[in-house]
Image: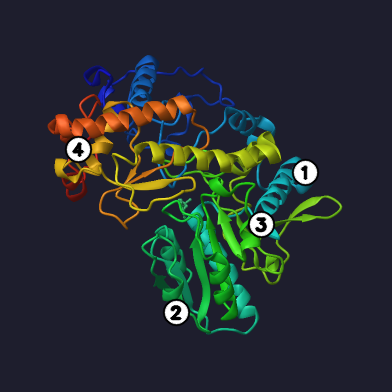
């Protein structure tokens, strides 16, 4: 991209008087731009860039070419499942019959949309074993908060007011303790064993009649299936607490095992991870919350009532109330439902097996050159602890930057915090063997370069529009404004 010509900011390309539009005169019910009454006009012109259309098109096209997404190439980004969003989802979500709906339309005019909600709720129940789902939460973290509010409403409905603690494993996603704290409860951390699973012996002394819930992520953040779930759920239930399942990334489980069957009471799913709806850049998303039979009455309003026709209703005295403007991000729910119907029962089963197979394939073919701190079979993702040969001085950061030179997005690095040089890889079920083989070759090549030309790796990237940025300077002296 030619930065000088096309500019970093559209404002840098602005020339006074340039226009990219033409408006017909007298086309506003008798008003034209010229005869809008003076008192309705602003006193000074808005500060807007003035450019011709072609300049604008090139500016944004060149910026988008500098971006790298799953549509450009392999994107082994762990834990967030930046998986492919099938085009059919977008086709359906773009249909005017769906996209042009207004949430305040009378119910009888939106029976189709309400049946999408209903169908998705039923599908999620079938996939998880839960008794009911709300689609209202807008994100995973929002779902966690709602789930914990359900748990609190449940305890309070029984007059059990002393339950203030939420147990969270040390390997949990950061949103878990944050949601517990925001819901007004106290976070208690439980340690993991050296094998990366919840330490049951460390859990036992934390249990008592003040425990509201325990949150678990499965497969956990290391991509491991938690070994002791039956024992843990029994212990927590025995002391009167409920089990919360963080199902943000349910990829490896789809069609294979169900949280309700494992003894979980409340859970959330990220539609924008497992069910292939887009995310990144902050939105849109959806974090539906599922509850086992008997807890549905506490779910937030509005909910879909199936009577003579489908209606959106608020009548539920036990509900914890409203947590969103309406019933969540409808078009996200629609994409997820499209994805589920497209794959069908058999197709969904393959998601889990292929996601697991692909992750294990890459792990096994790289573990002789990258350090695998927790050996064995993983689920949808796994974590290396940097290069095996520590004598080169090449860090995980260097490897990630060098990957950019070979046109790969970097994987998640320095997370989870359990290891110093974490490098977390999640290929997802969609990648072909050829794509994974090519990635493996590059990862091995970088391991060789770490020995033969460490300086090249240490100063990477060399082929990107911007080289290695100074993270510390960017954090300490961020430039957040453009001086106009
Ligand atoms: C992504 C993720 C979350 C949070 O979801 P958001 O939609 O980003 O709020 C919670 N838990 C786990 C395990 C996750 O991977």
Q: Does residue 410 sit above or below 181 in this rendering?
A: above
Mark sitting earlier along the chain (3/1): 1
**Disc 2 versus disc 1: nearer the observer:** 2
The answer to whether residue 483 shows anywhere in this view is yes
Q: Residue at x 35, y 38 (%)?
A: 366
Q: Given contact means CB atoms under 8 Å apart, are the residues at marks 1 and 4 in contact?
A: no
Measure how far apart labels 2 and 1 are at the Cα level: 48 Å
Indicate left or right for 386 with 136 as reference. Answer: left
Measure how far apart labels 1 and 4 are at the Cα level: 52 Å
- Tag 1, which secondary structure? helix
Q: Residues within 10 Å of mark 3 (few under 14, many from 20)?
A: many
Q: Is mark 1 within 8 Å of ligand 1?
A: no
Of the pair 395 and 26, the residue shown nearer to us: 395
**What residue did someone put label 4 on?**
469
Q: Position of residue 251 (x, y in %)?
A: 54, 45
**What residue did someone put label 2 on?**
206
Q: Quadrant of the C terminus?
A: top left
Q: Position of residue 332 (x, y in %)?
A: 58, 42
Mark sitting earlier along the chain (2/4): 2
The answer to whether residue 276 shows anywhere in this view is no
Q: Residue at x 26, y 49 (%)?
A: 421
In the picture, the disc for residue 133 is: 3
In the picture, the disc for residue 111 is: 1
**Disc 2 versus disc 3: nearer the observer:** 2
Indicate left or right for 194 with 464 as reference. Answer: right
- Tag 2, which secondary structure? helix
């Amino acid at each position: 991209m030619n930065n000088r010509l096309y500019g970093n900011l559209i404002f840098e390309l602005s020339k006074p008087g340039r226009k990219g539009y033409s408006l017909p005169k007298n086309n506003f019910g008798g008003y034209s731009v010229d005869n809008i009454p003076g008192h309705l006009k602003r006193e000074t012109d808005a500060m807007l860039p003035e450019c011709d259309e072609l300049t604008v098109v090139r500016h944004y096209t060149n910026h988008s070419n500098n971006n790298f997404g799953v549509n450009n190439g392999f994107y082994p980004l762990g834990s967030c499942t930046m998986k492919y969003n099938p085009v059919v989802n977008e086709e359906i979500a773009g249909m005017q019959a769906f996209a042009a709906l207004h949430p305040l339309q009378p119910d009888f005019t939106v029976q189709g949309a309400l049946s999408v909600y209903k169908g998705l709720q039923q599908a999620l129940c079938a996939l998880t074993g839960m008794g009911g789902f709300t689609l209202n939460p807008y994100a995973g973290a929002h779902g966690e908060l709602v789930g914990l509010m359900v748990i609190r409403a449940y305890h309070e409905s029984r007059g059990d007011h002393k339950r203030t603690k939420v147990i969270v494993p040390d390997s949990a996603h950061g949103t878990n303790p944050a949601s517990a704290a925001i819901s007004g409860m106290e976070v208690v951390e439980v340690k993991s064993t050296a094998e990366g699973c919840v330490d049951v012996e460390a859990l036992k002394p934390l249990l008592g009649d003040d425990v509201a819930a325990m949150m678990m992520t499965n497969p956990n953040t290391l991509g491991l299936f938690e070994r002791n779930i039956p024992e843990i759920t029994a212990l927590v239930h025995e002391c009167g607490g409920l089990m919360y399942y963080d199902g943000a990334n349910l990829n490896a489980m789809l069609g294979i095992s169900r949280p309700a069957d494992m003894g979980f009471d409340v859970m959330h799913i990220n539609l924008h991870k497992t069910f292939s709806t887009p995310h990144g850049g902050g939105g849109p998303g959806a974090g539906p919350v599922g509850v086992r039979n008997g807890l549905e009455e506490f779910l937030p309003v509005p909910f879909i009532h199936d009577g003579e026709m489908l209606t959106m209703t608020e009548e539920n005295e036990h509900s914890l109330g409203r947590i969103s403007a309406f019933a969540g991000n409808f078009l996200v729910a629609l994409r997820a439902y499209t994805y589920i119907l497209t794959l069908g029962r058999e197709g969904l089963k393959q998601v889990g097996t292929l996601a697991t197979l692909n992750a294990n394939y890459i792990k096994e073919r790289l573990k002789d050159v990258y350090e695998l701190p927790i050996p064995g079979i993983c689920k949808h993702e796994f974590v290396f602890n940097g290069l095996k040969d520590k004598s080169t001085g090449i860090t995980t950061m260097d490897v990630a930057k060098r990957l950019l030179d070979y046109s790969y997005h970097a994987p998640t690095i320095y997370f989870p915090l359990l290891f110093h040089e974490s490098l977390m890889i999640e290929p997802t079920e969609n990648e072909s063997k050829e794509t994974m083989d090519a990635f493996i070759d590059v990862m091995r090549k970088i391991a060789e370069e770490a020995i033969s030309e460490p300086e090249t790796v240490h100063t990477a990237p060399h082929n990107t529009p911007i080289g290695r940025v100074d993270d510390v300077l960017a954090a300490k002296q961020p430039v957040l404004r453009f001086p106009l």
